[in-house]
């Protein structure tokens, strides 16, 4: 069924290739941070260079996510109620940029304490400040999607650019160790990581000026401020069946994404004994994901988004089981080539939920008469970060119990090697398959969304009649 030709479906002529590309820079910075924290910071930097126990290292992001549980939805609510001449969302893109870069830089600076608990408090404090700055940026940024793109397929198209930005952010994240090594004269050290943090702090703060200049808000939405109280708004959100189903499949897939991200560097270091292969493997994974993302856009034009999500999730889960069987004496290329095969399915699982949430906002508009992109994306942003924290905490506790020691150049016992192998394969694949199962019978199909837009058009036309 084709989309309605009504006013709600008429795309803004400003939605050009250049502006979509500029919009994707926002997720480039966000995912540079999130992927750096997942891939390198939590169970590598904090254990080997900050010398925290794995359990304490895993607890750092979990505390940050406890803060996010309150601030992400609250930021969504604040942006829904903002009534500035410059807009509801875009001013926050400028307000949060400098604190975002500064907090990220300070997280990599050496803690001036000998006590393990004081070092833990130091890194936790900067992590929390980073979370607050990221919330100020990410929630309004993502809430712009339903305003900039209105139709079922154009939202997926805009999210393709956002996803490509996210994938490039992962590439920047896997470059953290090589950049730190280059800044340290060929050797990684606490000081070289601190310098890297400053360089990356500028890298993630500066693009927000471009995002701010390239985005816009719909004037007709500026005066439709949410009337529900925060408590009633949360209740309505939790009672929204479609949204809660989307939350379930997204959270399961997000934890899987971040779990494999957290343990993969440990997998190459301790299971295969080839830490240097981590970056090249991730680079191939990223390239495959980038190539696959436009292809998944074409696939999604022929089927519902939930169906494309399930196909990609099954592909990813099956490929990921290869990490259970890989051995140190296998040819290097055989393990490395596994990553791009996994990336083909991963791309769909990463892309589709963020396109689906924009459609959920329209359904909520039809039900409540309010535009509440902020609070919906606030909860979704929290889930995105909660996935990473939950994965890091789970991995940290399991590896602590399995006897993985902290510090550099340590030898992992067989119990820790087994734990890393299972976390990277069986546990991750089980979460992915659970997400695919939750996506079954997803009610907000292409046809249903087209009907919603027609009903919204009719309601707006009635409201225009004097």
Image: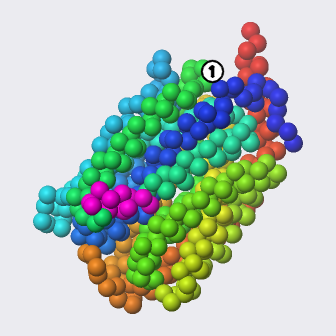
The residue that mark 1 highlights is 220
Image quarter for residue 17? top right
**Snapshot colouring:** rainbow
Q: Position of residue 72 (x, y in %)?
A: 44, 44
SS under mark 1: helix
Residue 136 position (above or below residue 272): above
Q: Residue at x 33, y 78 (%)?
A: 400
Q: Residues within 10 Å of mark 1 (few under 14, many from 20)?
A: few
- Magenta region, mostly helix, strand or loop? helix
* Residue 143 visible within the image: no
**Which residue reaches farthest right?**
1
Q: Position of residue 410 (x, y in %)?
A: 29, 81
Q: Residue at x 55, y 29 (%)?
A: 214
Residue 406 position (above or below residue 242): below
Of the 4 image quadrants, the one containing the C terminus is top right
**Which residue reaches farthest front?**
185
Of the 4 image quadrants, the one containing the N terminus is top right
Q: Which residues are magenta?
A: 174-185
Q: Position of residue 147 (x, y in %)?
A: 62, 31
**Which residue reaches farthest top?**
466
Q: Position of residue 441 (x, y in %)?
A: 75, 59
Task: Out of 456 and 145, give the one closest to the viewer.
Answer: 145
Magenta-span inclusion, residue 175: yes
Image quarter for residue 118? bottom left
Task: Out of 57 and 390, give the one closest to the viewer.
Answer: 57
Q: Residue at x 44, y 31 (%)?
A: 209
* Residue 302 visible within the image: yes
Residue 404 position (above or below residue 51): below
């Amino acid at each position: 069924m084709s989309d309605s030709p009504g006013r709600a479906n008429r795309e803004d002529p400003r939605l050009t290739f250049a502006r979509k590309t500029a919009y994707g820079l926002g997720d480039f910075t966000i995912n540079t941070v999130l992927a750096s924290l997942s891939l390198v910071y939590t169970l590598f930097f904090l254990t080997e260079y900050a010398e925290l126990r794995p359990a304490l290292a895993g607890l750092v992001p979990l505390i940050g996510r406890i803060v996010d549980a309150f601030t992400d939805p609250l930021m969504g609510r604040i942006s829904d109620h903002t009534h500035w001449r410059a807009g509801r969302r875009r001013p926050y893109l400028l307000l949060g940029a400098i604190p975002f870069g500064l907090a990220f830089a300070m997280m990599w600076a050496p803690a001036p304490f000998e006590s393990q608990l004081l070092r833990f408090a130091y890194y936790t404090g900067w992590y929390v400040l980073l979370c607050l700055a990221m919330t100020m940026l990410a929630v309004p940024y993502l809430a712009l999607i339903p305003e900039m793109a209105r139709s079922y397929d154009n939202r997926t198209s805009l999210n393709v650019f956002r996803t490509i930005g996210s994938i490039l952010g992962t590439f920047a994240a896997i470059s953290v160790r090589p950049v730190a090594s280059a800044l340290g004269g060929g050797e990684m050290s606490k000081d070289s990581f601190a310098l890297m943090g400053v360089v990356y702090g500028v890298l993630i703060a500066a693009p927000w000026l471009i995002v701010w200049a390239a985005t816009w808000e719909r004037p007709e939405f500026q005066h439709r401020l949410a009337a529900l109280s925060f408590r009633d708004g949360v209740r309505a959100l939790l009672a929204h069946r479609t949204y809660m189903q989307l939350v379930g499949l997204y959270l399961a897939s997000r934890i899987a994404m971040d779990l494999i991200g957290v343990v993969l560097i440990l997998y190459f270091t301790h299971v295969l004994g080839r830490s240097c292969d981590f970056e090249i493997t991730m680079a191939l994974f990223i390239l495959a994901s980038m190539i696959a993302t436009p292809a998944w856009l074409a696939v999604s034009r022929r089927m519902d988004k939930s169906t494309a999500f399930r196909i990609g999730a099954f592909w990813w889960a099956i490929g990921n089981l290869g990490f259970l069987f890989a051995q140190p004496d296998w040819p290097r290329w055989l393990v490395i080539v596994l990553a791009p095969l996994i990336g083909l399915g991963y791309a769909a699982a990463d892309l589709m939920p963020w396109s689906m949430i924009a459609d959920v906002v329209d359904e909520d508009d039809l039900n409540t008469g309010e535009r509440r992109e902020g609070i919906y994306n606030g909860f979704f942003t929290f889930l995105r970060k909660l996935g990473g924290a939950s994965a890091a905490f789970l991995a940290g506790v399991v590896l602590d119990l399995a006897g993985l020691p902290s510090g550099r150049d340590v030898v992992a016992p067989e119990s820790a090697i087994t734990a890393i192998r299972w976390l990277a394969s069986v546990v991750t694949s089980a979460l992915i398959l659970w997400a695919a199962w939750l996506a079954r019978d997803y009610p907000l199909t292409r046809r249903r969304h087209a009907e919603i837009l027609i009903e919204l058009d009719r309601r707006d036309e009635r409201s225009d009649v004097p």
